[in-house]
Amino acid sequence: MSKKNTSMAYKIAKYVLLTFLLVAILSPILVGDRPLICKSESGFSFPFVSEIHLKDHTNKTGWCILPLIPYGPSTMDDAAQQGVKPLYRPEGKSTKFTHWLGTDRLGRDVLAGIVYGTATAFKIGFFSVFLSFLIGVTLGMSAAYFGDDLWRLNLIQWIFGCLVLLISIYYLWYEYLIFSINVFHFIVYFLIIVAGIFVVNRYLFNRTNAKRFAIPLDTLVMKLIEIRKSIPGLFLILSLIVLFPKPSLWNIVIVISLMMWTDFARFARAETLAVKGETYIQSARVLGYDSLRILFIHILPNILPTLLVVICFNISSAIILESSLSFLGIGLPVEEISWGKLLAEGRNMKLWWLVVFPGFAIFLVVLCLNILATHFQNIGPKNNL
Amino acid sequence: MLFYVVKKVLLIIPTVILVMVLAFFLSKLTPGDAAESLMTIQGVLPQNSNSTHVYETNYKQLHLDKPDFYLSVQPDFFPENINSIITPSKRKEVKTFLYQKYNFEQIIQYQKDRDSYVKSIPEILQDTLLSIDVKNKIEASRKLLFPTSIDDIQYIIKSISDVPAIASNDSFLALKASIEELNRAKKTSYLPKLVWHGSNNQFHLWASGLFTGNMGVSIKDGRNVTDKIGPAIKWTMLLLILNLIFTILIAIPTGVYSGYKKDSFFDGFSNFFWLMLYSMPVFWLASMLIIYFTSDTYGTWLNIFPPPGSWVMTEDLGLMEMVGRFSGQLVLPIICLVANDIAYLSRLTRNNIIFQQMKGFVTMAKAKGLDDRKILTRHILPNALIPIITIIAGSIPAGLSGSLIIEVIFNIPGMGRLMFDSIYSSDWNVVFGILIIISIFTIIFLLLADLLYGWLNPKIKLA
């Protein structure tokens, strides 16, 4: 594609994505079987935030504003049972009550489902990319920056660090994971202890003249990536997701980020290696700046444009993974609505509108994200491939 | 070169071991009791008289009575090997008490005293002087067998301790003493205890079983896991190979052509088209193809392919014979697989061709007066395709994930389908057997890609 075409496609993709994002954010207002605002003798009320049913409002004198799609994602329309085709209008009702994209077997509106599915897809896309970005970029950047020999500790620091780490993992493991199953406390206390080790090592045991031994950080991170890479993605996700006692959206987020962090780590590592030799990093080092400061203030902003490509690709693959999982019927709880679930139902029931429209929504979002990624790749500072 | 190969091969050994440890401990986290499931498929119900015996046999046969790993680091009041308690209810009870930090020996003592007390209940009840009320109370103390917490136990004991017939009973006194002892020996602090179990542990047996082809039995139908995975591998291999052939046949020529005619209409069109195909979720494409092309619903002329689902092989066939037999059914799955992979390979080829065209040797060849076709075939292609070959080798394992969904949708009895079905029936032996086989397969292919790269690219040898 020529430059002009790509920028055109990029603009369109950007606006399509923004629309989807808006739909995702506004989904509770756009879709629902309860009116947004009602005017009655007693004044205004907002039924869509309260639990009062529709009938209580419509019987009164006054007026109501219904959402754009007057069906909730799980409202079963009695007039449209057994799956009606798109553009079906229940008899005796206004055009507003048309099922624009049909209904499923239980009479649930497909468009409403797609709007709610947008929110689910974006939630999973953003949160899993956020988590995997945190893990991956931290590991990748520090692996490249410190390499195998830059992060050196003297003997006391080594012994202190290893000892405290081992002992605290042991006690945290038993106290919080075995005796009172609490993963959150485990993670919080673990992070506090790691931070404590850093501080003590730095300010208490930091003897300048002692002999130092390096931490082979790069080798460790590369080995970790290799282990993760040696298990095919979907197989890993499937065997991890069955371990959670009950299905939830956050399980999927955690499992997907455990799978995707390697992309961030690899790219962050490669980019940091390229940037590391630049003069501004050298001078920052010579000026005696802290490693953390160099990593997060000098290196991170410079590798972000490249990582933007990975972010776009990973959001799209997270959305595809989530809908694949829901399509397979694994992971998401029953009450959560997702594109993949609609699609799976359509395939089982052989209803084409339940397959074509949710699938098209996935396709559109993924295509736009991929166009965005390609665009960032093309305008990126290093256009080597 | 030999040194390079040996070094690379040796480097994958720790990876394989770590992946195996990971898979094993994941399999240990799964819910359910394998010995009990095996009992169910043997046709022995828990209420049968021989169920205890069968359970014990299964438990030992599945090596569940052995420690998990070579080494365990645990609090000092834990037993050396908790798995050696065979009765599931007792094991569960010991675990619950241990997790409330009660000492192991006192727990065992309490269980013994409790059992002898419950056994003596009928004896006590023979006393005719007892009122109905008291008898009910004593009867209710059988609940000690299913305790919910230590407070419950103490409550039950307290409720019957003022009955004279009980208070003088030896077994009750022993029980009362042991529960007091249990409470007194509750730990508040503990030290780590290192226990070395030697090679007689579950991981060792599982891992050595992997190499000898004995991966245990499936708890779904009692068949050997190896026998179940064997035919499945064949199907997945067939899909992967066909996918690879068609992807290469389509992606490389189009990639070369659009790279060679950079920025032409064809280049732009194929780029956009591949991007569209790439963005299409594979299950969407598959579902649409199935709905429109395998039934009469949307016109008889659209009913081209047989519906998915009949993949029965009566005899053992070779890969080529499988293709011949199932060619009609294989078209749709292969289309879906190829559609997803083509974009990546084609784009990579295109970019590589463009990259090579900018090199000095191309300018030199042009200056020499060589015609364009010869420059392409003799100079650009060999250089551009070398990295492509290694990338293809490395991307074969990645195709496994895609084939999982395709196998599930089209009912192809491959590894992905087997994995999916086994997850649904909680058949963990099969699930983690497949996981480990696929991982080892992936590791080997990544190694091959690495070696191929080293072999084709002389620059690597120096490094």
Image: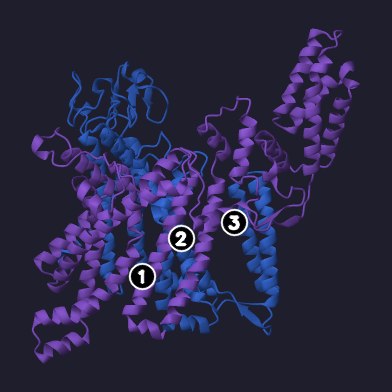
Chain colours: A blue, B purple
Q: Which mark is residue A24?
A: none
| A347 up-or-down from A290: above or below | above
**Amino acid type indicated by mark 3:** His
- SS category of the residue bearing label 3: helix
| B142 up-or-down from B390: above or below | above
Q: How far across and down, in percent of the image, does residue B287 sit?
A: 24, 42
Of the 4 image quadrants, the one containing the C terminus of chain B is bottom left
Of the 4 image quadrants, the one containing the N terminus of chain B is bottom left
Residue drawn at 39 percent across, 48 percent down: A124
Q: Residue furthest bottom?
A: B368
Q: What chain is tagged by disc 3?
A: B
| B61 up-or-down from B253: above or below | above
Q: How far across and down, in percent of the image, does residue B52 sit?
A: 64, 31
Q: What chain is tagged by disc 1?
A: B
Closer to the observer: label 3 or label 2?
A: 3
- Toward the viewer: A49 or A315? A315
Q: Which residue is mark 3?
A: B204
Q: Marks 3 and 2, how far apart in space?
A: 22 Å
**In the displayed structure image, the side of residue B453 where residue A298 appears, left or right:** right
Q: How far across and down, in percent of the image, does residue B118 sit?
A: 78, 24
Instruction: Tell me whether circle 3 and circle 2 mark residues in contact (CB < 8 Å).
Output: no
**Amino acid type indicated by mark 2:** Arg
